[in-house]
């Protein structure tokens, strides 16, 4: 039976938390990640003994029996690579749908992220749309946060602005992105609202707080977040100066036709 410490899925996650920390997206304990493990991965590693049970504040019937590698609450992304067993945990959702069975990690007695509702509910939503989805990640990128203080908070307007700061955006997320107003983070309500958006989008902005990204792989979820953050940086850098050379709706339509992109048609005029 192999040791989890040597698992490629653990290295993938800890390399990602270090990258996110270095990009300034995860100050202190900011941000959290959950990674759905495959049955084969769980079989191969020493994950057959329940260390303890941790109650969950909501039901996840869709996820019963599934195992997730999840960052710990209050833990710092910068520390995950050097001390994974303390900062991360692997949990399995028990048959009752409201208990997490700890199979590895949280070695100082800790538990999963306070954003567990948004993570688990988003996994349920994304798995309905794409059974290959495995990653949900949350972080606090500077420019996305700043933009959310001054920009109208509806999916269409926010998507349009982000798409128009960089041609590549409509290629990377042709379905657009969801936006939620300020809500109580960590609550079941923000979890439900996030999951509802995740039925349509892989990106959900939490105004005044940060962003969620979903994907089949770390590259996909991370790539979505960094593409949005880059566009938000361009938006914030332009600031109040007049745009005299815009990317127009017509430009985006022509690019989409050329590149064969099936984008969200009602998001362009
Ligand atoms: P946790 O430390 O509980 O993961 O919370 C961090 C965070 O970003 C809350 O939104
Ligand atoms: Zn947060």
Image (spheres, rainbow, N blue to C red):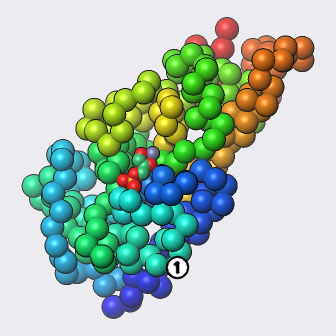
Q: Residue at x 62, y 32 (%)?
A: 146
Decide which of 46, 204 is in the foreground and name it: 204
Circle 1 Cα neighbour tier, 10 Å, few/some/many (<14 / 14–19 / ≥20): few
Is residue 70 in view from this perspective? Answer: no
Q: Residue 194 placed where, x, y %?
A: 38, 34
Q: As drawn, which residue projects farthest toward the top? A: 269
Q: Residue at x 65, y 20 (%)?
A: 160
Where, quadrant-wise, is the N terminus in this rendering?
A: bottom left
Q: As drawn, which residue projects farthest toward the right? A: 244
Q: As drawn, which residue projects farthest toward the left? A: 96
Disc 1: which residue: 82
Decide which of 31, 262 is in the foreground and name it: 31
Q: Residue 216 placed where, x, y %?
A: 50, 53
Q: Residue 50 placed where, x, y %?
A: 18, 76
Q: Quadrant of ligand 2?
A: top left
Above/below status of 41 relative to 237: below
Q: Residue 241 placed where, x, y %?
A: 83, 17
Any atom of ligand 1 within 8 Å of the CB at mark 1? no
Decide which of 259, 185 is in the foreground and name it: 185
Tell me which corner region of the image, top left, top right, bottom left or bottom right, holds residue 84.
bottom left
Q: How many marks?
A: 1
Decide which of 29, 120 is in the foreground and name it: 29
Along the horizontal axis of the image, is 30 left or right of 19? left
Is residue 19 in view from this perspective? Answer: yes
Q: As drawn, which residue projects farthest toward the front? A: 28
Q: Residue at x 51, y 66 (%)?
A: 13
Above/below status of 225 relative to 207: below
Tell me which corner region of the image, top left, top right, bottom left or bottom right, holds residue 156.
top right
Q: Residue at x 67, y 8 (%)?
A: 269
């Amino acid at each position: 039976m192999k040791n989890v410490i040597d698992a490629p899925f653990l290295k993938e996650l800890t390399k990602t938390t270090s990258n996110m920390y270095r990009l300034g997206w995860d100050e202190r304990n900011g941000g959290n990640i959950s990674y759905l493990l495959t049955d084969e991965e769980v079989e191969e590693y020493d994950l057959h003994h329940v260390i303890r049970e941790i109650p969950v504040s909501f039901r996840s019937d869709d996820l019963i029996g599934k195992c997730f590698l999840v960052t710990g609450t209050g833990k710092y992304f910068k520390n995950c690579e050097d001390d994974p067993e303390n900062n991360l945990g692997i949990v399995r959702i028990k048959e009752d749908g409201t208990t997490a069975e700890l199979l590895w990690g949280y070695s100082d007695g800790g538990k999963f992220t306070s954003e567990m509702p948004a993570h688990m509910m988003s996994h349920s939503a994304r798995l309905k749309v794409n059974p290959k989805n495995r990653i949900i990640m949350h972080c606090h990128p500077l420019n996305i946060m700043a933009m959310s203080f001054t920009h109208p908070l509806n999916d269409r307007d926010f998507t349009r602005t982000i798409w128009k700061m960089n041609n590549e955006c409509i290629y990377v997320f042709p379905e657009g992105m969801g936006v939620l107003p300020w809500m109580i983070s960590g609550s079941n309500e923000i979890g439900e609202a996030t999951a509802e958006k995740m039925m349509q989008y892989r990106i959900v902005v939490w105004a005044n707080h940060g962003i969620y990204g979903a994907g089949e792989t770390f590259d996909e979820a991370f790539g979505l977040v960094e593409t949005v953050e880059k566009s938000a940086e361009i938006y914030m850098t332009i600031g109040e100066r007049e745009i005299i050379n815009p990317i127009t709706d017509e430009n985006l339509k022509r690019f989409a036709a050329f590149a064969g992109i099936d984008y969200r048609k009602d998001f362009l005029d």
